[in-house]
Image (cartoon, rainbow, N blue to C red):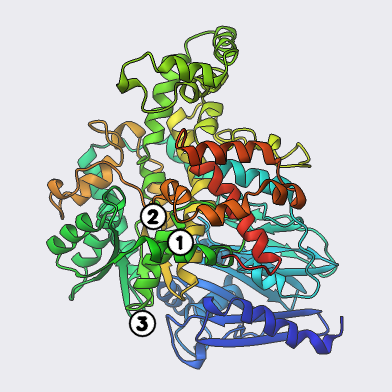
Amino acid sequence: MSKQDWPTHLRRMGQAIGHRGPDDFGIWTDAEAGLGLVHRRLSIVDLSAAGHQPMQSASGRYVIVFNGEIYNHLALRSQLERAGLAPAWRGHSDTETMQAGFDAWGVAPTLKACVGMFAFALWDKAEHALYLGRDRLGEKPLYYGWQNGCLLFGSELKALRAHPAFIGDIDRDALALQMRHNYIPAPRSIYRDIRKLPPGTLVRIAPGATSANPEPYWSLQEVAERGLSAPFSGSLAEAAEMVESQLKESIALQMVAEVPLGAFLSGGIDSSLVVALMQAQSTRPVKTFTIGFQEQEYNEAPHAHKVARHLGTEHTELYVSARQALDIIPRLPLIYDEPFSDSSQIPTFLVSQMTRQHVTVSLSGDGGDELFGGYGRYIKARGLWNRMGWAPGPARRLTGSIIRAIPRQSWDSLARLLPHRFSNRPLGDRLYLLADVLACEQPDILYQLLISHWKDPSDLVLATSGDFAPEQVLASLSDKAAFEDRMLFHDTTHYLPDDILVKVDRAAMAVSLETRVPMLDHRLVETAWTIPWSLNRQDGQGKAVLREVLYKYVPRTLLERPKMGFGVPIDSWLRGPLRDWAEELLGAARLRREGFFQAEPIRQKWTEHLSGQRDWHYYLWDVLMFQAWLQAQSGDSCT
């Protein structure tokens, strides 16, 4: 590849992710080192040319492209100045502060001192080494890998695809994992030999290298085990006071911006708490944003409106029609860039799109469920294991075998003889799920079953290697850790960064909106892991500590309702306005021609779903999002 062509290739890569940074564009190359960097900037702090990237450090040693925010960068500047290590500042951007830290302290020590969200590529001219780094919890994305002997890296896969060296062979094991989880867990991506840099890691790549070994500079496992070994021993009120103080500090740091700022508000515990603490520290009404749906079972807007009115925010809500939501679906493969099938991606994009019309930065309440035990599945999993775990394994497996010896349809026929209240779900499905549960030999496997969509995706995806077995779900923590703690750990290391944060980052950045997540300040995460599960679980509800804080600002009556989630009625849409679109993507001949799936189980579920016999929309949406993504990659229409 001619070096004269580098600027052209870099420009194409930058243009591919122009939505992430519409305000500025820059290229830097070092032909001797064989390296090129391109950056797209969304200007948030220091809007002047002094924040332009790629940026060289004051010493000239380092060149960086940086995505994200260092919230404590002013404190780091003061620290450098007091130590006599500060350069002559050219501007007041956090990127320049970070570069000064690299010059003064080195790369890893600087990352440990930073409070923020980020992904970056850093070229060290002195050592002729490239560093790739990612924030502790995985708020900002970073892909990398070798293609045709060329190292490619970027914030989104579309940037890598724009380079002529890109190959793009699909990783069928990654596809199988998407069928199980509705996302592709790090470090895999949908493409072979392209990886996601794990959260909290730094990798050093020397010239000529063909592989990389990311090293942690911060370990959630160490944080969790340290917190569990020395738990907080105070009362609920004392824990709430501690969390409130830290969350206030996190929010204060994250409210610093030189552009308009607001917050998503669903009316639930987490977003309401973030907004309450924002408003408590603001001299003017905070801008808050909610979308509503006509379908009441999906509509959180009235709850958010009541919270906003109580707190006195400047509230904007937008009711969207089913047609508006449906119109987003053809764009999903381009927005999410690899197969991703959490259907709340649709309302997340819609609220981001509406919010961007008013502000450039929005805070969110994500992370509260994973850190403070808010998901109902934790209680469900514990309850199931308590009811069955005492029985010997052989007896459980025998009972499961007996259940499966009778076809589902026969169990369904038997259900017609039962009272109507027992027939809200096909009896065969319920009993077959029970058989799966009975086969679980330990609670960790039970939890994996409960959070899986396709239970055995190797029977669905053709030509998998067989070694893609799902992550050893709760095994990273000590065996002494309680089952509840192991579930929280799994969700914080997998579900949070690979689903929740991907969903929010891609949806928001598609409209050039920066999102910030105060709950994921790593210092608050470290505190959360010291709070015992028993303290967070009060009166049958999770997140007791967060509730205790929030009730100081918002009356209980505005908040006490079942957890709703953030979704859209995909199940009924697949039987109605999405039926033709889905039928085209799920056609038996098409599935066989493309060669990624066994057609029969998909067609069976599609037929049963259309008949109304069963609700298979989670399973079908996984397949549909891959099919739509595959079609988009081939250049065909996704409509």
Q: Nearer the viewer, residue 25 or 336?
A: 336
Task: Say which amino acid is labelled 1.
Answer: Val
SS state under label 1: helix
SS state under label 2: loop
SS state under label 3: loop
Q: Nearer the viewer, residue 190 or 220?
A: 190
Give the residue drawn at x 51%, y 83%: 22
- Among numbered discs 1 and 2, the one appearing first in the sequence: 2
Give the residue drawn at x 75%, y 52%: 594
- Mark 3–mark 1 distance (CA, rounded to whole Å): 20 Å
Task: Say which amino acid is labelled 2.
Answer: Asp
Viewer-side label of 3, 1: 1
Q: Quadrant of the N terminus?
A: bottom right
Report which residue position mark 1 lands on.
504
- Tell me where residue 406 appears, x and y as whole percent: 57, 13
Report which residue position mark 3 lands on.
259
Question: Few, some or many C-alpha atoms within 10 Å of disc 2 (few <14, some 14-19, many ≥20)?
Answer: many
